[in-house]
Amino acid sequence: MSEVETNNQEQEAQPPIILALKNINLTIQLDKRVLEVLRDVSFTVKEGEFVSIIGPSGAGKSTLLRVIAGLVKPTTGVILYRSKPLSSTTKGISMIFQNYALLPWKTALENVEIALYSNDQLSSNDKKAKALRSLASVGLAGFENAYPGELSGGMKQRVAIARALVLEPEILLMDEPFSALDPLTAEHLRDEVYSYIINPSSPIKSVIMVSHNVEEVVELSDKVIVLSPRPAHVIGQVNIDLDRPRDKKSFEFYTYVDQIFALLT
Amino acid sequence: MLAALFLSVLFSWAVGIAAGVSKGAERAILPLLDVLQSVPILGFFPIMIYAIISILPGKPGIELAVVFLIFTSMAWNMAFAVYESIKAIPREFLEMATDLNMSGWGKLRHIYIPASWPKLAYNALVSWDVGLFFLVSSEIITLGNSNYAVSHGIGVAIATYAAQGNYVAYSESVVLLLVVLIITRALFLRPWALWSEKFKPSDEAMQMRTDAVYRSYRWVGEKAKAKVFSNMRLRGMLAFAPHMSRVEAKIGQRLRARSKTIGKTAFIAFLLLLALLLGKAMYPGIKTITYQHATAFWLDLATMEKEVLVALAFSFARVWGVYLLSLVIGIPIAIKAGLSQRLYEPVSTVTQIISSVPGPVLLPAMVAILLAFPFKDELVAATIIFLGSFWYIFFNVLGAARTIPKTVIEAAQLYQIKGWRLWRDIYIPSVMPSIITGSITFIGGAWNTLMVAEYFDVSSNGSTVILTQVNQGIGKLLDIATYSGNIQLMLLSILSMSLLIVVVNLTFWRWAYNFTTKRFSYNV
Ligand SMILES: Nc1ncnc2c1ncn2[C@@H]1O[C@H](COP(=O)(O)OP(=O)(O)OP(=O)(O)O)[C@@H](O)[C@H]1O
Ligand SMILES: [Mg+2]
């Protein structure tokens, strides 16, 4: 990978903006009523940035992530991905779904491979090799032939991460990636995920993560977007300027946690 | 019909609550219900008539037989519905009742019966369809033989008009039936089902937006699985044995062994009862069989069995042919409709109405339409089987398609998986358990429909018109045996048929069920 420098967090020069949301509105037509889900949401994501979206339950966080993934079209507003308007799903943006979205009838390896199905340039041997490498990169070498039902929650989450990574996206979207795990596993995986995703050999430049958990957000993010209850709009942005790895017992850490809690309530 | 439904409700309360409340009753009743559920009821119908008439000759006997038949087509399912509801009552409710010093009657009125409403009502929707099918079929079957004919009934009217070539009156009565069907559905059964929802524990009520009918089809399907693999649940329990204490494991083992013996005893008791009735019916015949006749008797039986086996092979091919066709047609339509917000409502409404029309009433019209086609008889038979059983696959898959996790669909979209790959790798596997559930019910239903599908005649003014008949088939053989009063043939046919069904269930379907639930279920 050639982007070693641009990936670096502590770079002095302003890194370029990779994704920009401009005045995103979304209303959904239900049977009888119209539901406003997103109201005038704007923010930017820079290269190398880990951005978190936090907000109350049912605010519209998952929906916002779907809009960014190109799965749902906004009613009005544009998303610029590397300065070009985004109109559908793209190879450059991949997503880890809430509850993993693994297929129970496919092995870990096959679950990773399905992300490559539509790629006609690769031979099936190449696809397999890529998928194997991706699994190995999240520490699942040796579990290729296990079915999701045979894997623990943390391992399933790793398969989901491997699947998102195999596409070599520039932007990775994660919808509450740790919320279904027990606290101990989540803690462990949070540390690891950061190193899988944001490292010089990873193709991923930026991450957008949806979360409920304020401490988790402060631990991982460079920037936190705080959303209001539905219809979701941005009620605050917090830049977190702490050295990594972050000390979760430090005074500064808690200042950030309090600041975000204050915005949420 | 309503009388039978009413009877079924009463029966299911009595039996279901007894089984749900008392452990002893549970152990006796459940295996018995299992057995009763899995016999092809319509196949037993001729024997039942024969037996009942020999005890209670004349019209009342026949009417009784018909009511009994409809009752048997509805009651077992509904009893299961009640039983499951009772079992699902949260412990706190019962503890509260004890706390309040509620009497037995009070518990019944305020807890058991309300708790059983939702499942019972949903189940009644399907049972009603099934019951109608049996009603019409039974009326039509009895028509063939003037000795056994039921005198009044919509099935009778329709078949008679058709036999007389009075197609105006025929169409009128079909339309009338359709209107009555829609009205009973709209005015009675559906409101009942919806009303009963308020008795649901509230977290379940969240999911109640999904439609009643496909869920009840699914539910009946689940029952079909449960009855085929009745001791699988216990096996599942034993799988947990390492987690349970050893004592508990032992109890599980003993329970399993006991339920097996009880199941067997129940089955034998059932056969004995049947034999007793038959013995009574055949008694004059048996008396005349002397020693010299005995060899001839067995030889006769052997030739008959040969005939039965050939017929069985034909019917087997027919059932499985239509089954495969139904899979090919039903799965894509059901998945498409289930996944689409726009299509789901209209498709499910229309299919619900079509599904509630009992196939046999359309038979004369079908015969008229399909007359010009080659293999007309096979086509008619196939259509009847299709109309009677297709819905089990359709509604099961429709329901399953609605519950495919949204994220899975979105993942496919994100990875741009399209076309055949999407179906082969995502959609079809996602609904696989429901395909199997639907299939088990389909096959069960299909064997029943054979009775009308393979041979169909109507008599009016003393002359009998054969509307349609296939070349070979167990349903036809059974019908003919019924009309000619050939009890040996009847018995041989029904026993061979039951044996075949049981063997296929225990081998193929058990394997398919085990495999799909292990591999294709999202909630592992
Ligand atoms: N396609 C849709 N149809 C109906 N309602 C929708 C749809 N999409 C979103 N909504 C509604 O929009 C709101 C936001 O949903 P969303 O899943 O984005 O919330 P969320 O912030 O992710 O919540 P949670 O924290 O519970 O995951 C919810 O009230 C949801 O019911
Ligand atoms: Mg969400």
Image: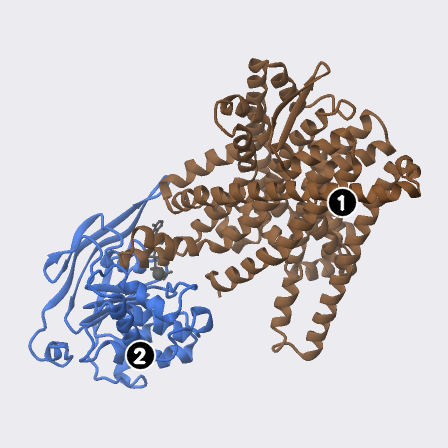
> According to the rendering, which colour does chain A have?
blue
Q: Position of residue A54 (x, y in %)?
A: 29, 66
Q: Which amino acid does label 1 sit on?
A: Ala
- B116 relative position to A224: left or right: right
Q: Mark 1 points at which residue?
A: B302
Hey, which quadrant is residue B9 in on the image?
Answer: top right
The one nearer the camera, B198 or A63, is: A63
- Residue A112 position by quadrant: bottom left
Q: How crowded is mark 1: few (under 14 residues within 10 Å), some or many (20 or more)?
A: few
Say which residue label 2 marks: A136
Pick out the residue farthest to the left.
A13
Question: Percent x, y for residue A225?
Answer: 24, 66
Name chain B's colour.
brown
| Residue B89 seen from this side | no
Q: Residue at x 8, y 74 (%)?
A: A14
Marks 2, 1 in one chain: no
Does residue B316 appear in the picture of this structure? Answer: yes
Residue lying at 68% horizontally and 45% vertically, measured from the top left: B497
